[in-house]
Amino acid sequence: MDSVIKCVAIDDEPLALDVIAAFCRRMGGVELLVFSDPVLGLEAIRREKPQIAFLDIEMGNLSGITIARELPPDTCFIFTTAYLSYAMEGFELDAVDYLHKPFSYSRFQTAFSKALRRIGAEAQPAGRERSILVKQDYNNVRILLADILYIEAMEGYVKIFMEDGTCNISRVILKNIGAQLPDSEFIRIHRSFIVAKSKVRSFSKREVVLKNGRTLPVGRLYASNVAEALAGS
């Protein structure tokens, strides 16, 4: 398949969403939106029509069982829950799989592969057409990963700087956009900056110089990870 796999994860536990986001980054070829509010998550699924949804079951005001019944016909789903008692109901709803928390990366891969077979797709390998989807004003804008130079956090926003000199501004926090980016291609160097590894010309413990000459600071807490990651890239 020549496009990324669009996914939405809904879980009222932020740490559970962090795990799914990390596993999706390791998989590659995945565009993931995460929601801790199930109502907002269901709205996003109806709007974005992802191919795969990861659904926790026991959530405050809206259960994963209810969400599963409301999914668009082309969206398959995987339950992610700490409660084995829902397994039978999940499969009766035609869930692709049932991930019992805490689950390993290999178990996640198995479930994801089942979902890909269900939708008749294969995750796209790294390449120029891989992209992320961001909200800009009232529109959804698709941005090619290969064109991103670096991303800067502002107050409740991010600025996505492109190789051609343009800049896209989106109302999202840096952590959430970072969750959509593959670790093999991007690295967070500071609490306010993520850079594309392939666009780095030189680096030290204090700064990173991009190929266009832009110099960005390296945060003290990120210095060792930056040196290790960029030295091997």
Image (cartoon, rainbow, N blue to C red):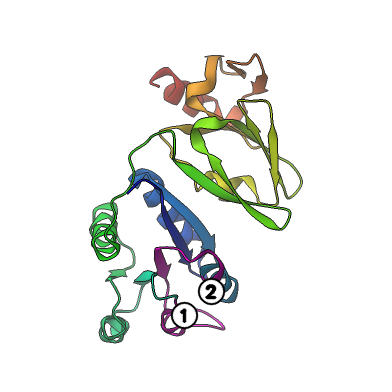
Label 2: which residue? 42
Residue 202, above or below 140: above
| Residue 217 coordinates in the image, percent (x, y) | 66, 23
Q: Looking at the image, do the residues carrying marks 2 and 1 touch, with CB atoms under 8 Å apart?
A: yes
| Residue 37 coordinates in the image, percent (x, y) | 58, 71
Q: Residue at x 60, y 25 (%)?
A: 163
Residue 78, above or below 195: below
* Disc on res. 18: none
Specify the segment rendered in magenta: 46-71
Q: Residue at x 40, y 22 (%)?
A: 233
Q: Does the magenta stretch include residue 47?
A: yes
Alpha-carbon distance for marks 2 and 1? Answer: 7 Å
Q: Residue at x 44, y 38 (%)?
A: 129
Element under disc 2: helix
Residue 201 vs residue 29: left or right?
right
Instruction: Work out whether residue 141 can be spotted.
Output: yes
* Amino acid on which disc 1 is placed: Ile
Q: Is residue 141 magenta?
A: no
* Amino acid on which disc 2 is placed: Leu
Which is nearer the eye, 208 or 222? 208
| Residue 81 coordinates in the image, percent (x, y) | 37, 73
Q: Residue furthest front?
A: 2
Element under disc 1: helix
Which is nearer the eye, 138 or 188? 138
Residue 14 vs residue 233: left or right?
right
Nearer-N-terminus badge (2/1): 2
Crowd tier of the residue under label 2, counting other residues whose Cα lies within 10 Å: few below 14, some 14–19, many 20 or above = many
Which is nearer the eye, 73 or 37? 73
* Disc on res. 67: 1
Residue 207, above or below 16: above
Crowd tier of the residue under label 1, counting other residues whose Cα lies within 10 Å: few below 14, some 14–19, many 20 or above = many
| Residue 150 coordinates in the image, percent (x, y) | 60, 31
